[in-house]
Amino acid sequence: MDLRNELRGSRQNHHDWYKYMTQGANTIHDINPDFIVIISGLAFDNDLSFLKKKPLDLNFPHKIVYESHIYSVSGDTHRWRVQPVNWICNATIQLLHQQSSFLLSGKNPAPLLVSEFGYDMTGGSFADNMYLPCIVSYFASVDLDWSLWAFQGSYYYRQGKVGLGESYAVMDDDWKSYRDPNFTQKFELLQRMVQDPTSNVSKSNIIFHPLTGYCAHVNNSKELVMGDCKSNSLWSYEGDGSPIRLMNSAKCLKAVGERLPPSLSEDCLSPQSSWKTVSMTGLHLATFDKDGDLLCLEKDSNSSKIVTSKCICISDDDSSCLDNPQSQWFKLVSTNV
């Protein structure tokens, strides 16, 4: 049972929120203690930050889930065009953490559901096209639970029109095909459980490419390529400066050169086998070539191969770099499943 969708307006205030959320949650629990109670915040379900100072006082905390909404329009959409993409993505994740995802960690963590997010599936929104890989990379990294706006391809009647299409919908206007033909791939990893608190399996990593939704595989030719996220390769990684090792193998990724695929090598002590995350987002996996120049993993534009290339817009202080770096975004997603 959900309390309550997108509270907003000039009359919203913390005093009333605590009073009525407590009353509503207690009422639901008294009627049926088996229900999970979902608690929404203020400012269109964007803001739960006030819980840092004053937690909600309920005597059944293990039946409570908090919810949050996030869209590209939750901030200034124009900024994606005029500031470096890595900067805006970092600011987007930081804002989400300040307002709601802080609940996932700390002394008294609580479950969080992002009960609405989405994007213009026609591809017609520049801000949404930039925002989606950013937010998807974060969701995957913490195995966040979510629901998507929206499924319905069209409406019987809306805004004075019969059969009006929904650009954010999974389905097209006729409800026959996906509005975004790449929808299922983009969301394949997000639909998997990748972190199980009851698991005894050792942790490993998935190399995830949030722009496409693909994961890294080692193919039969021992090349690093993009593929689905159902049968992906698994990797070990101990942090900046360490090799990225193929699990159950003596081999690791070693940079060969500009625009070339990294090799699977047993030379894991080489500088070309030492990897670190760079840029504000931490979404670039970088190493050095033989000349000491920094190279980042990148999806090859003409094939399914993953190559190493000169890193795009990774500086923290160059506001003039507006090239799109998302082909180089790779997230090491921890998994024990």
Image (cartoon, rainbow, N blue to C red):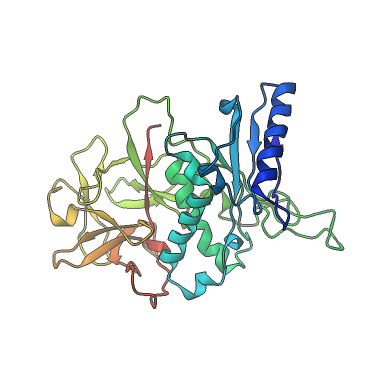
- Whether residue 86 is visible, yes or no, is yes
Residue toward you, 44 or 133: 44
Q: Is residue 270 left or right of residue 329?
A: left
The residue that appears at 20% across and 60% down in the rendered structure is 256
Q: Residue 322, percent across and down? A: 42, 74
Q: Residue at x 44, y 30 (%)?
A: 196
Q: Quadrant of the C terminus?
A: top left
Say above or below: 127 vs 67: below
User: Does residue 229 appear in this view?
Assistant: no
Return the x and y of residue 271 as percentages of the image width and height: 14, 56
Residue 219 spot, x, y in % from top left: 32, 47
Residue 29: x %, y % from top left:
69, 25
Q: Is residue 112 left or right of residue 31?
A: left
**Residue drawn at x 21%, y 64% as measured from the top left:** 257
Q: Indicate the quadrant where residue 286 lies.
A: bottom left
Q: Quadrant of the N terminus?
A: top right
Q: Give the residue at x 30% y 67%.
A: 311
Between 199 and 99, the one nearer to me in the picture: 99
Q: Is residue 319 above or below residue 202?
A: below
Q: Between residue 324 and residue 54, name the one nearer to us.
A: 54
